[in-house]
Image (cartoon, helix red, strand yellow):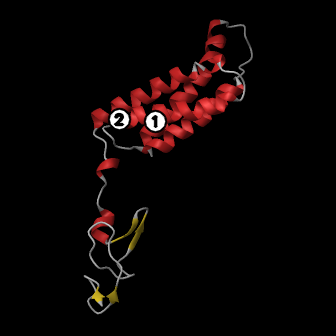
């Protein structure tokens, strides 16, 4: 029987999913990829560490692409917006992921989703700003649905 690296008096068959050291239940830390020893579990993942220049480029790309894609919604009929949102959200998420150097960032994902919402609100905001006597501010429901679906899919890709 094998013994824990830190507690030699405890027999175990459990190994760290990264370094493969034997660990006992006291040492094991549950992660999304299995149990890890304390040292491996506390390491910062390189995929979640984004340098400032890439962070700025990814954020700008996400916001601009999201807003631009949302401007296409008036040309799509009805509930097809949901399917388009999933496809566009995945595409924009993948593009931003590549701009980030194949790294992920929850904050960049949130900014990308915000870009989709900004694009969805822009046509209504433009009407209000161009006509000061206009009293109402009405959002296109399909644009909001598109922004929610696409933003959610892009955020999920980048988290």
Quadrant for residue 144, please give it: top right
105 sits to left or right of 69 = left
Give percent across and percent down for residue 141.
71, 27
Tell me the CA gap for discs 1 and 2. Answer: 9 Å
Neighbours of disc 2 within 10 Å: few (<14), some (14-19), many (20+): few
Quadrant for residue 61, please give it: top left
**Quarter placement of the N terminus:** bottom left
Q: Report the disc number at residue 93.
A: 1
Give percent across and percent down for residue 27.
34, 78
Tell me which residue sits at (61%, 12%) in the image: 126
Tell me which residue sits at (46%, 39%) in the image: 109
Give percent across and percent down for residue 151.
55, 35
Neighbours of disc 1 within 10 Å: few (<14), some (14-19), many (20+): many
Q: How many marks?
A: 2
Q: Report the disc number at residue 150.
A: none
What secondary structure is found at the residue carrying circle 1? helix
136 sits to left or right of 159 = right
Give the residue number, with chain letter if any, for mark 2: 98
Residues 30 and 34: in front is 34
């Amino acid at each position: 029987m094998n013994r824990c690296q830190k507690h030699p008096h405890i027999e175990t068959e459990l190994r760290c999913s990264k370094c493969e050291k034997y660990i006992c239940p006291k040492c094991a830390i549950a992660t999304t990829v299995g149990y890890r020893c304390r040292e491996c579990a506390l390491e910062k993942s390189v995929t979640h560490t984004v340098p400032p220049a890439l962070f700025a480029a990814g954020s700008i790309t996400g916001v601009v692409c999201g807003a631009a894609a949302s401007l296409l919604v008036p040309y799509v009929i009805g509930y097809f917006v949901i399917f388009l949102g999933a496809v566009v959200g995945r595409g924009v998420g993948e593009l931003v992921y590549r701009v980030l150097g194949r790294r992920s960032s929850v904050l960049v994902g949130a900014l990308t989703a915000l870009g989709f919402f900004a694009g969805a609100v822009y046509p209504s905001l433009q009407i209000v700003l161009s006509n000061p006597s206009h009293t109402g501010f009405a959002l296109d429901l399909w644009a909001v649905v598109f922004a929610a679906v696409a933003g959610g899919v892009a955020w999920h890709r980048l988290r």
